[in-house]
Amino acid sequence: MADPPKKALSSGVVTYAYILLYIALSSGQIFFNKWVLSSKEINFPYPLGLTLLHMVFSSILCFVLTKVLKIMRVEEGMTLEIYLTSVVPIGAMFAMTLWLGNTAYLYISVAFAQMLKAIMPVAVFILGVAAGLEMMSCRMLLIMSVISFGVLVASYGEIDINWVGVVYQMGGVVGEALRLIFMEILVKRKGIKLNPISVMYYVSPCSALCLLIPWIFLEKPKMDDQGTWNFPPLILTLNSLCTFALNLSVFLVISHTSALTIRVAGVVKDWVVVLLSAILFADTKLTLINLFGYAIAIAGVAAYNNHKLKKEATQVSSNESQPPQLLPSASSND
């Protein structure tokens, strides 16, 4: 029989290993995408094509892991009506987020893109209020004001601001906010809870189709004209594999920790990306105003996460006091 202290120590080491793996993969994937899209050596400035490749790769791997090898399980309870009314909008918004977010890397630095992403809770809250999922309050207005002010200060400190890149990045933020709202509607109003693997299994093919149509009209003609079909297949395969590994790491972290842990790890990852990008990329020039504004925004994000987690804890405790419902249950992640 294992010694309890040693077992607890071993479990703690494994948990921290998963968290570090998530931070490393999440940060690394951002840098990898930036390098693939902007590198002269790779010569693949096609964010739509790159994102489409990720979704096709994810769709195939999910199918192999769940249906062929059967080493992972897909949650049951999905119907055609739920797929068309919930999964399709989620897939479309996910495609929009990745497409616009990756396109932004062609115009702005990784660090500045990360700073702009801090405005996400504001977009989610505004859309949540409009959808009837959030309630307006003085506390939330204060938090949203702090985040907005921090992002404005960080933007003011940007030396070489490119407004095309800003528009693309903010479009990606809106797309992600809409995806999160649709996910919440799927869980709260339709009672379907999916783990990350199930989400990838259902959403990836839909996102791939949503990306394929604009790619045919917007990027395929450019690739044909410039003869850039001879891109390095190994590099793009590794890039797609890293994306899939990142989603798996999210699954592992949530399975072994909590929603709070993944959110704290996300904040740490944001700072790692901002600081490392100044070292890795020549187009990143951080200023004290940049960092000061981003610190203010991150403080607001931390307050928002704390508020959301307390709200979720209250809802869980109230649900536990009610009779159980026959609904598929699993850990979920946005």
Image (cartoon, rainbow, N blue to C red):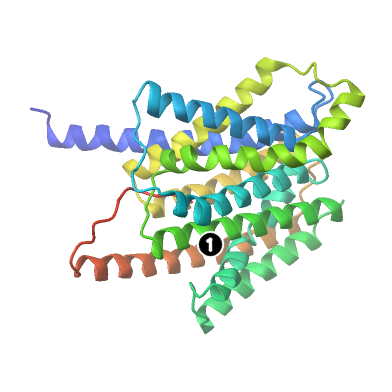
- Residue at image position (39%, 53%) is 259
Q: Which quadrant, please, contains the N terminus?
A: top left
Count residues near mark 1 (Cα–Cα under 10 Å), then give few for <14, some for 14-19, many for 20+. Answer: many
- Residue at image position (45%, 34%) is 248
Q: Which residue is mark 1?
A: 181
Evaluate whether residue 20 shows in this view.
no
Q: Secondary structure at mark 1?
A: helix
Circle count: 1
Q: Is residue 319 above or below residue 218?
A: below
User: Residue 64 occupies which quadrant of the picture?
Assistant: top left
Measured as percent of width and height from the top left, residue 159 is found at 85, 53
Residue ranking furthest to the left = 1
Residue ranking furthest to the bottom = 138
Measured as percent of width and height from the top left, residue 69 is found at 37, 21
- Residue at image position (19%, 33%) is 7
Measured as percent of width and height from the top left, residue 270 is found at 59, 48
Q: Is residue 303 above or below residue 38?
A: below
Q: Is residue 327 left or right of residue 94?
A: left
- Residue at image position (62%, 32%) is 54
Q: Is residue 189 left or right of residue 139?
A: left
Q: Is residue 134 above or below residue 183?
A: below
Measured as percent of width and height from the top left, residue 80 is found at 45, 49
Amino acid type at image mark 1: Ile
- Front residue of 87 and 19: 87
Evaluate whether residue 134 shows in this view.
yes
Q: Is residue 12 left or right of residue 260?
A: left
Q: Is residue 321 left or right of residue 254?
A: left
User: Residue 284 occupies which quadrant of the picture?
Assistant: top right
